[in-house]
Image (cartoon, grey):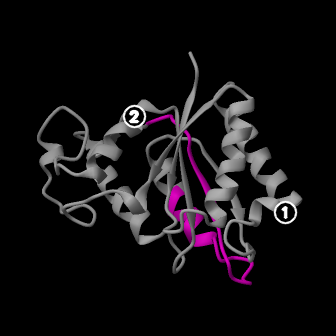
Amino acid sequence: MTKKVVFIHGSPRKNGNTRALAGVAMRALADMGVESGEIDAPRLDFKYPGCIACYKCKGVEAYGCHVDDGLARAVGTLPDYDAIVLATPVYWHGPTAQAKMLIDRMFGLLKFGENHEFHTPLAGKPMALLATGGGVLEDNLDMLEKFWSIPASRVGSPFLSCLFPHCQYPPGEAATDPAAAAKAAAYGRSLAEMLGA
């Protein structure tokens, strides 16, 4: 069965550097027989910006957010994939607000056991990160990497990151840098190998 990876795009720019580098990674995945889907977080409709802590998702057996909007529908598709890639530029040491709204709704994919253990259909599926930073700081992506890797660890998911801390190209041109493109392609191949492709 063909493996499928979903890229959650966090950038408000349709043609920014993060999306360009994610495109390189997706092509590398395709070359190894892995399909890629995309969720454009900044363009999803929503009734509420993020989770409203209604806890309706905890009172039923099914997993998912009970708010009827685009964010909830997008979250509902995540268990259909074999890996989830958060592809976002760093905004104030974290993901973009648009990506964070979707991530917060992922609370609906989590249930708690009697001993406070987590149950989720995402358990064991790689949670990966492809992130860009436009600044000059070496560690400008460290907090973002922790933001995504800690939840992955808590639910027993492998983690793989590809960080571009000095992504100071004009919008969309990062992929024209041979070194950056090679790094993104290698990341795609590594993710495919992690999935057994």
Q: Is residue 59 above or below residue 106?
A: above
Mark 1–mark 2 contact, CB under 8 Å? no
Residue drawn 71% across the image and 42% down it: 188
Question: Which of the labelled discs sits on residue 61, or is there none?
Answer: none
Viewer-closest of 33 and 16 = 16
Q: Position of residue 147 (x, y in %)?
A: 50, 64
Of the residues under marks 1 and 2, which one precedes in the sequence?
2
Residue 110 seen in render = no
Residue 174 x, y percent position in the rendering? 75, 65
Q: Which mark is residue 79?
A: 2
Q: Nearer the viewer, mark 1 or mark 2?
A: 1
The image shows residue 195 at horizontal and vertical percentages of 63, 29
Q: Secondary structure at mark 1?
A: loop
Which of the numbered marks, if any, corresponds to residue 177? 1
- Tell me which segment is drawn in magenta: 123-148
Residue 20: x %, y % from top left: 67, 57
Q: Tag 2: Cα neighbours inside 10 Å, few (<14), some, or many (≥20)?
A: some
Q: Who's the residue at 17% across and 60% down the image?
A: 53
For the C terminus, which image quadrant? top right
The question of residue 59 being in magenta is answered with no
Quadrant, the N terminus: top right
* Amino acid tagged 2: Pro
Q: Is residue 173 left or right of residue 123?
A: right
Vertical position of residue 168 compared to residue 54: above or below? below
Find the distance from the CA under tag 1 to the CA under tag 2: 34 Å
**Looking at the picture, does residue 37 appear above or below residue 165?**
above
Residue 32 versus residue 55: which sits nearer the camera?
32
